[in-house]
Image: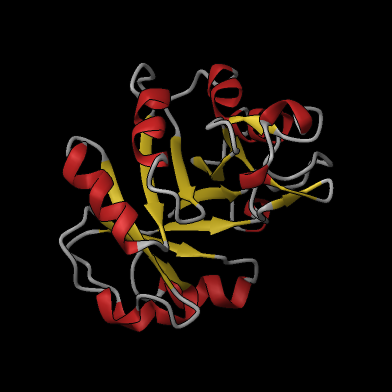
């Protein structure tokens, strides 16, 4: 099993989706990678944040300058990392401008990127334009469950869909924070990436 730190969470006290959280996880031996969420600001800066609101402002309606003390840019985080661990990038929102902006942001890094999203149109367009990247669909919460069999490189599945795994492609399972759920997944094999807030439980 590969342990992927969900939003950079683990035993530390740093804020999730923050540079300090990701650096700490990259320096933790039993963690095999990180998962982070990206959004586009009004002035087309890619920031790392799960929700579309920060400090009471809508990210997609706000210029980065106005929220820069509350949120990290993707580029700043990537510049702080130096390992070859997996970096799972979850594209949030539905602004298709993020496709080219993301590519231009990550193209000069040699990291092991996995690009994914709930947005089927965005993720398929990213794969069509930039086919050398590993690209996958996020499936869960009754979203995209009819698209488990797709032509992308990997799937990112909610853990309760474990019985529908396509073992012909790489699979990420989210969000596993319970030892009983982890043990159920292990019965299906060890060749999975486990996205978790509590990697320390499964090391």
Could you say which is closer to the camera, residue 29 or residue 115? 115
Q: Position of residue 57 (x, y in %)?
A: 77, 48
Coloured how?
Answer: secondary structure
Q: Residue at x 60, y 18 (%)?
A: 80
Q: Position of residue 104 (x, y in %)?
A: 37, 24
Vertical placement of residue 189 versus 108, above or below: below
Q: Position of residue 127 (x, y in %)?
A: 22, 46
Q: Residue at x 27, y 43 (%)?
A: 134
Q: Residue at x 48, y 74 (%)?
A: 159
Q: Quadrant of residue 64?
A: top right
68 left or right of 137 in image: right
9 left or right of 121 in image: right
Q: Quadrant of residue 138?
A: bottom left
Q: Residue at x 66, y 53 (%)?
A: 52
186 left or right of 197 in image: left
Vertical placement of residue 147 versus 21, above or below: below
Number of callouts: 0
Residue 21: in sight, yes or no?
yes
Q: Position of residue 121 (x, y in %)?
A: 30, 59
Could you say which is closer to the camera, residue 77 or residue 29? 77
Residue 191: in sight, yes or no?
no
Q: The N terminus appears in which quarter of the rendering?
A: bottom left
């Amino acid at each position: 099993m590969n342990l992927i730190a969900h939003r950079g969470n683990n035993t530390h006290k740093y804020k999730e989706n923050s540079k300090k959280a990701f650096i700490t996880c990259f320096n933790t031996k039993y963690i095999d990678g990180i998962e982070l969420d990206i959004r586009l600001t009004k002035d087309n800066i890619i920031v790392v944040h799960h929700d579309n609101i920060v400090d009471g402002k809508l990210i997609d309606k706000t210029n980065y300058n106005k929220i820069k003390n509350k949120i990290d840019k993707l580029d700043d985080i990537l510049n702080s990392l130096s390992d070859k661990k997996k970096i799972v990038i979850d594209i949030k929102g539905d602004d298709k401008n993020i496709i080219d902006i993301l590519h231009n942001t990550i193209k000069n890094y040699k990291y092991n990127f996995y690009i994914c999203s709930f947005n089927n149109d965005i993720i398929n367009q990213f794969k069509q334009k930039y086919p050398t990247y590993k690209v996958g669909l996020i499936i869960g919460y009754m979203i995209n469950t009819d698209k488990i069999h797709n032509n992308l490189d990997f799937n990112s599945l909610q853990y309760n869909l474990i019985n529908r795994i396509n073992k012909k492609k790489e699979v990420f399972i989210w969000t596993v924070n319970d030892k009983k759920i982890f043990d159920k997944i292990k019965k299906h094999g060890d060749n999975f990436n486990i996205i978790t807030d509590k990697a320390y439980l499964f090391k």
